[in-house]
Image: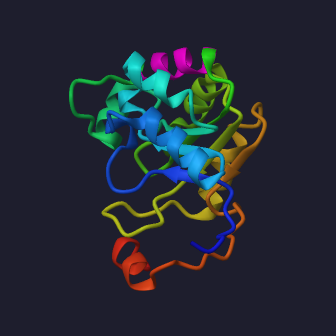
Amino acid sequence: MKDIPADYATFSGVGEPTLASNLGEAIELARSTLRLPVAVLTNSSLMTREDVRNELVLADMVVAKLDAPDEEIFHQVNRPAGGRTLGQIIQAISLFREKYRGKLALQMMFIEANKDHAGEMANIAEQLSPDEVQLNAPLRPCAVRPLPPEDINSIKGEFSSLNNVMTVYEAPKPEVVPLNRKETRRRRPEV
């Protein structure tokens, strides 16, 4: 295998990485085999489970999704399954943060339904003390139109009390060369 420059070996993709019953083992295997730090992108829904939090602690970076300030918007934006509540997820991220020594990032997607609640979401983020906050808009093809850069920049102003806040529109865009262009286009079609 030829060397490929990379920052992290990242667990993400189609499906939720924390569904893997061997996530901790997979993290350790990826780190030792690839000799790279490991990141896990999670929708946060299973962080309510102690065993999942214990396995996530093994990652060098965890990016936890949080898109709502209250239960009503949580159900509207995320349509959670399995009876999960926003309160449970916030409490789980807080418990995780208490013992996690790696880099915790919160990924917050803003759309029309939650954009007027940025201040409330910033307060939640502040309570969770992330190392980084990522303010996103849905730029891949989906049923929801992305907010324009000026709206996302206005939302960013609500997060001024936090350090290391970036938006999807200002994040650096590294040049990435896919290993298999056809497979990459199938998974990530261009907008």
Quarter of the image for the N terminus: give it.
bottom right
Position of 165 with respect to 92 (left or right) is: right
Residue shown at 57%/51% (left/top)?
33
The foreground one among 29 and 52 is 29
In the image, is residue 97 part of the stretch drawn in magenta?
A: yes
What is the residue that sits farthest to the left in this orientation? 82
In the image, is residue 88 part of the stretch drawn in magenta?
A: no
Residue 50 location (% of width, % of height): 41, 16
Residue shown at 34%/65% (left/top)?
142
Magenta-tinted stretch: 89-98
Magenta: main secondary structure equals helix
Quarter of the image for the C terminus: give it.
bottom left
Residue shown at 30%/63% (left/top)?
143
87 in relation to 163, above or below: above
The foreground one among 39 and 4 is 4
Q: How is the image coloured?
A: rainbow
88 in relation to 61, above or below: above
Residue 109 location (% of width, % of height): 49, 48
Residue 104 location (% of width, % of height): 63, 34
Number of callouts: 0
Quadrant of residue 151 within the rendered picture: bottom right
Quadrant of residue 181 within the rendered picture: bottom left
Residue 9 location (% of width, % of height): 57, 53
What is the residue that sits farthest to the bottom in this orientation? 182
Position of 8 with respect to 160 (left or right) is: left
Quadrant of residue 123 within the rendered picture: top right
Residue shown at 41%/64% (left/top)?
145
Position of 101 with respect to 80 (left or right) is: right
